[in-house]
Image: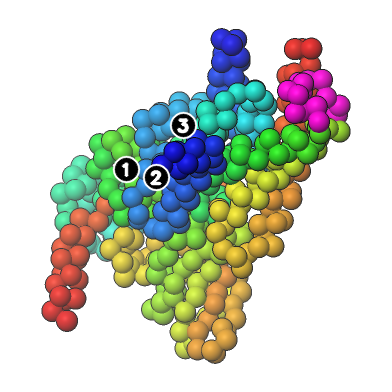
Amino acid sequence: MKNSVLVNSVRFIALLLAQVFIFNNINFMGYINPYPYVLFILVFPFNANRSLYLCIAFLTGLTMDMFGNSGGIHAAACLVIAYFRPIALRFTFGVSYEYNAIKLPNVSFYERLIFISSLVFLHHLVLFSLEVFNTSNILYILKKTLFTGIFTSILCLVFNILFSSRQQ
Amino acid sequence: MQQIINFLIRNKNFLLFVFLFFISLVFTIQSHSYHKSKFINSANFFSGGLYESVSNVQGYFNLKTYNKQLLEENARLRESVQRLTSSNKVDSLSQVFLNPTDTLDVQFNYIPARVLDNSYSRTDNIITLKAGRRNSVQADMGVITSHGIVGIVERTSTKYSTVLSILNSSFETNAKLRSSDHVGTLKWDGQDPNIMKVTEMQEQAPIKIGDTIETSGKSAIFPKGIPIGTIENFHLDGSKNFYTLSIRLFNDMTNLGHVYIIKNNDREEIKTLENGITNEE
C-alpha cells in the first residue's frame, strides 16, 4: 500500500513536470500539443476508492489549469475520463475486469491500445470543446481532437510500455 | 428520510462527479469572460516560482537573439534622441541621459519584464511575466516589445503577473492606419499566431496592401502609434460599409523574451473625466 502511494506520487510529479515544461511547448504543426499527463489517470490503481480517485483526477486537472491559465478545462476533462474509466475497462477487457484480475502490464498490445486511445480521445474531445467554447468551430474542435489524440495516444503507449515492462 | 440517505450513499460517486464537474465548468466560463475573478492562474508563488527557475535556464539558449533585439532597439532610440536634440527641443544629449525623468513631464513609464511562459497554440492564450505589484505593475496596463504590442496585464501577484495575449479571443483594442486616422477594432480569430483581423474600418479609409497599422491611443492602455503589423489583404464586409483587414504582425508572438509594461500616469485622471461625462449624461 505504502509502495503504491509512493509510486503514484512520483508518477504524478514526473508526468506533470514533463507536461508543463516539455510537452506544452512542442507546438507541432503550429497547434498540436500532446497531453501525456493523462496517463497518470489511466493507470491509477484499478481497485482504488472511487471517490478518492475522482477527487485526485480533479486535482490533477486543476494543477494543469493553474500552469496553463486555462480556467477549468483540464479539470473537467480529467474528471470525465476518471468517471468513465470503469466503462472503458469493461468494454475492453470484458469479464476479466469484473473479477479484478486485470493488470495493465499483462494485457495484450491491442487491448492496451483500445483502452488508452478511447479514453484519450474522450479527454481531448471534452478538453477542446471547453477550450474553444463555440459551436460554430466544431470542425476545428474535431480536427484538433483527432490529431492531438493520435499524438497523445502514441506517447502514452510508449511510456506505458517502457515503464511497466520491468514490473512483470 | 432513510430512502433519501440511501439514495445519496448509493449514488455518491455520481453526485461527486456532478459536483466537481460543475465547479470546473464555473472556472471555465469565468476564464472565457474578460476580467472575472479567476482563482486558478499562474501568477502565484508555486507555478510562478517553478516557471521562473526553468526560464532562468532556458534564457541562456536565446541570449543571442535577445542581444540582437536590444542592440537594434538601442540603435533606433539613439537615432530618435539625435533627432530630438537636432530639432532643439532638448539642449544637449547629456541632459537627456543624466536626468531622464527630469526633462519632460512624461505621461508613460516603461517597466521592463521577462517572459516566463508564453503560449500561442490555443484559442485563449495567456503570458506569464516576472514582474508584479512589487514592480508597481497593475491590471489593465499595456504590454509591448520593441516590435509591437503583446497584450494587456490581467492579474498580478507580488512578484508575477499574467497577461492577456493579443492571441486571445477576449482581446480587443482600437487600431488605426498610420497614414490616416481611420479606426478599426483589432481582434484575433484563433487560427494563425502571425495574423490578426481589423474589423469595422470605415469604407472611406485609403487602404493599400502593405500599409502599416498602429495603436490609436483612444484607450488609456496603449499610447498612440505603437506598431501592430502590415495589411496583408482586405475585403468589404456584407453590408458594404466596413472593411475587414488581415494584419501580419510585426511581433513574432511565438518568440518573446523581454517585454515592456506601459504605465500610464494620467490614467486615473482620464478615467475620472470619462466617468464624469457619462454620469452627466
Q: Earlier in the sequence, mark 1 or mark 3?
A: 3
State left or right for residue A147 relative to residue B250: right
Evaluate whether label 2 is on the same chain as label 3.
yes
In the depicted view, which residue is nearer to us: B45 or B177? B45
Q: Quadrant of the N terminus of chain B?
A: top left
Q: Which residue is mark 2?
A: B162
Q: Which residues are magenta?
A: A95-109
Q: Earlier in the sequence, mark 2 or mark 1?
A: 1
In which chain is the residue bearing label 3?
B
Query: Residue A92 placed where, x, y %?
Result: 80, 36
Q: Secondary structure at mark 3?
A: helix
Q: Are marks 1 and 3 in contact (CB under 8 Å)?
A: no
Residue A1's disc number: none
In the depicted view, which residue is nearer to us: A96 or B4? B4
State left or right for residue B28 relative to residue A31: left
In which chain is the residue bearing label 2?
B
Using the rendered image of the protein, determine whether residue A149 is visible from the camera's viewpoint: yes
Q: Residue at x 71, y 39 (%)?
A: A87
Q: Earlier in the sequence, mark 2 or mark 3?
A: 3
Evaluate whether label 2 is on the same chain as label 1.
yes
Using the rendered image of the protein, determine whether residue B128 is visible from the camera's viewpoint: no
Evaluate whether label 1 is on the same chain as label 3.
yes
Q: Are marks 2 and 1 in contact (CB under 8 Å)?
A: yes
Find the distance from the CA under tag 1 to the CA under tag 3.
Answer: 15 Å
- The crowd level at tag 2 (other Cα within 10 Å; few <14, some 14-19, many 20+) is many
In which chain is the residue bearing label 1?
B
Residue B156's disc number: 1
Going by the numbered disc 2, the residue's amino acid type is: Thr
Going by the numbered disc 3, the residue's amino acid type is: Tyr
Residue B51's disc number: 3
